Image: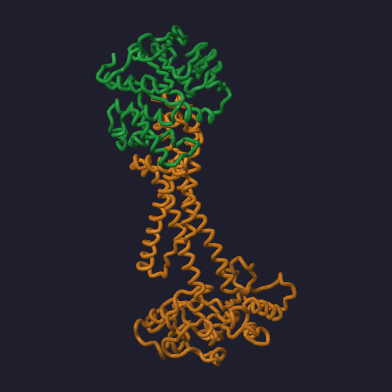
Amino acid sequence: MRFADPIKISYKNIVAAKWRSFLTVLGIIIGIGSVIVIMAIGSSAQSLILSQISGVGSNLIGVLPGASSEKGPPAQALGIITTTMKYDDFLALIDKRNVPEVSDGAAYIQGTDFVSYGSNDVSLGITGVTHSYPDVEDAEVDAGRFFLPEEDTNLARVAVLGSTAKTDLFGTDNAINKKIKIKSQTFTVIGVMKTKGSSSLGAGGSDDSVLLPLKTTQKIVLGMDYLSFIRLKVADVNDIGVAKDDITKTLRIQHNIKNPVDDDFSVRDVASALDTIKNVTDILKYFLLSVGSISLIVGGVGIMNIMLITVNQRIREVGLRKSVGAKNSDIMLQFLMESATITLVGGIIGIILGILSSFLISVIVTNGFGYDWQFIVSLQSVIVATVVSVLIGLIFGMYPARKAAEVSPMEALRYE
Amino acid sequence: MAILIQAQNLNKTYENEGVSTPAVRDVSFEIGKGEFVAIMGPSGSGKSTLMQMLGFLDRPTSGDYLFDGKNTAGFSDDALALIRNEKVGFVFQAFNLLPRTSVMENVELPLLYDSKREKKEENEKKVMAALRAVSMEHRATYLSNQLSGGEKQRVAVARALVNNPEVIFADEPTGNLDSKSGIQVMKILQKLNDEGHTIILVTHETFTAEHAKRIIVMKDGDIRQDFQVENRRVARDGELLK
């Protein structure tokens, strides 16, 4: 028997029973379609998250108080406040003699408090930063100026507002040189930052924060003498690994740590944070994928069911084919090809619908929610979906096909 | 005359839920090449069962069946499929054409399962020759469901013929036909016999059986009579069956 013959026979039979074939294949269409959509959403969401994070800058190294493993979350994220990191540590880290790879760095202390202007009283994030903040964060001043180097330590009562914080306090009015009050202390607004967008890797530099000089925040507002975290900018991205080693050495000397197990700090870079988040989103994606696969199995059972009915309905045809010389394997091949063709067609329809839905979702998310949601359908997912749909046809068609192949020609011809 | 079919003590017993029903009991006979044999008998006599065993659609419960000198008892399913493809053609009472399929494709069916895999043009030639033999070449492109009963059966005969088999089995070929179409089919079978094909016809109608050269009468699974037909009927156009 030629290879093309069973394909021709399958095509004929499928077309002859269009409506039933469609219903049969609906499960596969939905299954493959949802797998494609899940893969696409997964990829898009992953790329969105990763692009937001990498927007912070892949040349940044974060130093956080508290020990943590490379893959696990930092201690802060678990609500543990560690007070071991001080301004002196920051000075040591930006010292070229200790860490030559670092070109600049900023120290941060974070808290939340009420900020008032006139009768307007708003709860806002208070972030104490060093004057190097705009350089490290690639942040830009919209109006006024940022802190001067001497204001890091001279307890100057000046404030720079994040764009949202400015709107919260002043609306559209000019804020420069206005006085705001925090903890009954008066601060002069000297600048307003440009909108930076949501940032991650700690909440530093958010638009809804009031930025104050580091020492001022520690002594006057929050009453703390430690740092929330330090960010260091590395001149050459390729030096990140060396820089991390140097930072670790420097901090061990600063903190008198002999045994690495006793480290009371964590050094992280955006690349490794990306890795961690990619792992998490991958797990999420595969979980969703396995949920999608269940619908494929259900679809496969539907195929098996309908193929059993088909075999019964066409048992006389099986008998006839055998009477003119079809071998058991010819009959088996015919029915397997038929179920695989049905599922392949279903798979292709599912892929097309899945791609359309993913595109629609990307349009809705981009236009409706303002995210930079990319439309991603990987060739890999299309190939996998195609192969899987054929495999389902072969696997679930096996039992009915075997049943058809093994029936004796005499019984098949006699079947009413 | 060379012997084509040799049945030696053939038995067929159906087992159904613990009850065994003998359909063919200890039957022995020979059929030579070029014979036209009618197997007759009332329904339940075992004539169809016998034909199915002779046509390799079913295996005997016991006994030996020698086809063309070879004992087929140990043949695998695939070997039997090969014999059905190359040596045997069937014509059934219910025609058994593939629905929504053209006359040509129906006749071509045995060639699709031919291990020799001839070229498409070669197959087409064989199909057209078979259709010419049953005077159906003018309907070659029709779909099987557009044909009348008599035309369907002639297409079925062409299908049985297309691989140029040693023997054609016809199981009540006129059973579903009006008498005019019936006589046409009998005429074709007689013509094929004249051309050298061995024909084995199963029927319960004496008139139809009398078109054969030899009649085997069965009852209750046994052969009761086996005789040559003197002055057999010759089917002519315009004549009515019965």
Left or right placement of residue A268 versus residue A399 in this view: right
Residue A51 in sight = yes
Query: How far across and how far down the image is residue A117, in percent?
Result: 40, 83
From the viewer's side, name the closer residue of A384 and A362: A384
* Residue under the image location 40 percent in, 23 percent down: B195
Left/right placement of residue B235 relative to residue A92 reads left
Seen at 29% across and 18% down, the residue is B236
Quadrant position of the C terminus of chain A in the picture: top left
Looking at the image, which residue is at 30% across and 22% down?
B184
Asked where in the image residue A247 lies, by quadrant, the reply is bottom right
Residue A338 visible: no
Q: Above or below — where is A157 with respect to B76?
A: below
Chain with green colouring: B
Tell me: residue A130, above or below residue B5: below
Instruction: Name which residue lies at 40% across and 89% down.
Output: A176
* Residue sitting nearer the eye, A244 or A224: A244
Instruction: Name chain A's colour.
Output: orange
Q: Residue furthest left?
A: B238
Relative side of A265 to A339, left or right: right
Task: Indicate the position of residue A119 as horizontal and vertical percent values.
Answer: 37, 81
In front of the other: B26 or B124: B124
Please tell me in which quadrant of the rendered image residue A364 appears. Answer: bottom left
Tell me the colour scheme of the image.
by chain
Q: Is residue B155 left or right of residue B11?
A: left
Query: Of all residues shown, which one is farthest toward the top?
Result: B224
Percent position of residue A326, x then y: 47, 33
Residue A369 at what x, y percent from top left?
A: 37, 68
As rendered, which of A415 and B213 lies closer to the eye?
Answer: B213
